[in-house]
Image (cartoon, rainbow, N blue to C red):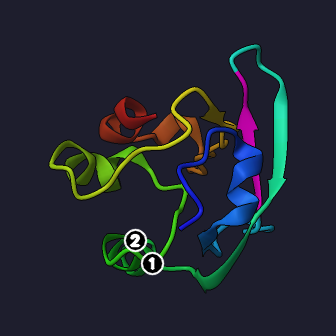
Amino acid sequence: RHGKPITPEDLTQHNCLLFRFWDTPNQWQFLSKDDQFIDVKVRGEVVSNNSLALHAILLDGGGMTMAPTFLVSDDIAEGRLVSVLSDYRIKPISIYAVYPHRQYLAAKVRAFL
C-alpha cells in the first residue's frame, strides 16, 4: 500500500509491529553506512512482548517489524518475507551476563561467556 521503504524515515508511513521488550518500542534506531544514528518514531496497531506472536502476524502480512535474523532468515530465504532497508543496520544491543564468583565458575559457563 505504501511502497517499499527506502530510508528509515519511510517507516512512518507503514504499520509496524512493535516488540515490547524495549523501553520505547516505537522508537527504532538505525546506523547509516557512515555510522550516523537515525532515530525514527514508528507507529503500529500491534504491540507485543512475544516475538513468536509478532512473527506469526508478520507472516500473515500484518506489517513490518525489526526481527532477529535467527527468527526470520528461513522465511526470507524461502520468499515468505522480504528484507527491507538492507543498507542500514540497527543500533547494537548490549547483552550482559550475571554469574557467581569466578573462582567456582563452571567450564561450560566460562565457554559460553
In-image side of 101 versus 51 (left or right): right
Farthest-out residue, top: 34
Q: Is residue 22 left or right of residue 77?
A: right
Measuring from the top left, give residue 72's x and y in whole percent: 32, 53
Total residue callouts:
2
Classify mark 1: helix, strand or loop: loop
Q: Residue at x 67, y 42 (%)?
A: 94
Residue 17 versus residue 92: which sits nearer the camera? 17
- In the rendered view, tell whether residue 42 sits above or below residue 48: above
Determine the main secondary structure of the stretch shown in magenta. strand
Q: Position of residue 43 (x, y in %)?
A: 74, 73
Residue 30, magenta (yes or no)? yes
Image quadrant in which you'd find residue 109: top left
Mark identifier at residue 58: 2
Residue occupied by mark 1: 62
The residue at the point 53 percent across, 49 percent down is: 4
- Please give the label number shown on residue 98: none
Amino acid of disc 2: Leu
Relative to 40, 15 lies left or right = left
Quadrant in the picture for residue 62? bottom left
Quick one: SS at disc 2?
helix
Q: Which residues are magenta?
A: 27-32
Look at label 1 and name its amino acid: Gly
State the separation of the CA atoms marked 1 and 2.
5 Å
